[in-house]
Image: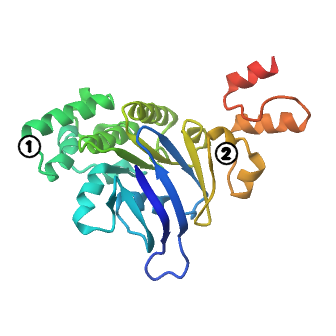
Amino acid sequence: MINVENVTYMYPGQQREVLTAINLIIKSAEIVAVLGHNGSGKSTLAQLLNGLVVPLNGQVLVDDLNTRAESSIWQVRSKVGLILQNPDNQLVAHTVEDDVAFGPENLGVAAAEIKQRVSAALASVEMSDYLNWPPSRLSGGQKQRVAIAGILAMQPKYLVLDEATAMLDPKGRKELLNITLKLRSEGIGVVMITHHMSEAALADRVVVLYEGKIAAMGTPQEILSDVNQLRLYGLEAPPIQQVVFKLRQAGMDIPRTIMHASELVEALC
């Protein structure tokens, strides 16, 4: 597991802590969605999990490897893959094959094994047919899938998506979410930092950051159904939860934990 223990972080030259007393456990084979308005500390948390920055106080342990230890940092980054908003910032080679091979090559993996890893990673994200394509010819969603394949080729145990769907159209977003669910079924722990509340509904747990602190944590049913509380954190509940909230305010006896339109239809009928 990834264990975030009482972590505080402040960027050099600033007077205000970005994150304060964060405690969080992320396990294999689960999706944890992290919500919060701009400036709440979401991206900083992503970088702490990957060891790109280290805590001012507290510690982050990745399978008992401390991100503070310089001797462990490459192991940490091979275990925790980080995907950013803009896939163009993560694609470095002239072909899809070379790009996916870049990570394991830098880890010193043997050539024969790299070929196997590239093939398996591209198959996992359904991009095998694009092996020799230049990344510049791909759509945004396809580029993001190649970026994920490059991480998967390093055989991580955890994947952190830092608003990875933000620049995608609805089709690309849906494709990426399906891959996320598939990765969970394969035993990979996923941290999904997002502004899209409908994406959080797919998670096993939801964490809400507010002014650098964990303001709420629970199941999607618990967090997303609390419409008034979400508004206090600068967030809007998904449309279905807002409809349920208004119907309950009007006196209708339906469960507040309804998550999907089909559930609402069933409750109403």
Please indicate whether residue 63 sits to the left or right of residue 95 in the image.
right
Circle 1: residue type: Ala
Q: Position of residue 42 (x, y in %)?
A: 51, 58
Q: Position of residue 25 (x, y in %)?
A: 48, 52
Query: For numbered disc 2, what is the local secondary structure?
Result: helix
Q: Nearer the viewer, residue 13 or 165?
A: 13
Query: For numbered disc 1, what is the local secondary structure?
Result: loop
Structural crowding at the residue carrying mark 1, measured as other residues with C-alpha within 10 Å and reported as few (<14), some (14–19) or many (≥20): few
Can I make out residue 132 in this image?
A: no
Q: Position of residue 107 (x, y in %)?
A: 16, 52
Residue highlighted by disc 2: 223
Q: Does label 1 or label 2 sit earlier along the sequence? A: 1
Number of marks present in the image shown: 2
Can I make out residue 235 in this image?
A: yes
**Residue most extreme to the left:** 111
Tell me if residue 27 comes above or below residue 61 in the rendering: above
* Quarter occupied by the C terminus: top right
Please indicate whether residue 109 sits to the left or right of residue 20 in the image.
left
Tell me if residue 148 comes above or below residue 178 in the rendering: below
Which residue sits at x=18%, y=46%?
104
Q: Position of residue 62 (x, y in %)?
A: 35, 55
| Circles 1 and 2: CB atoms closer than 8 Å | no
Residue highlighted by disc 1: 110
Please indicate whether residue 206 sits to the left or right of residue 114 in the image.
right
Residues at marks 1 and 2, CA–CA distance in whole angstroms: 46 Å
Which residue sits at x=38%, y=34%?
183
**Residue most extreme to the top:** 269
Which color scheme is applied?
Answer: rainbow
Which residue sits at x=47%, y=35%?
177
Please indicate whether residue 4 sits to the left or right of residue 53 in the image.
right
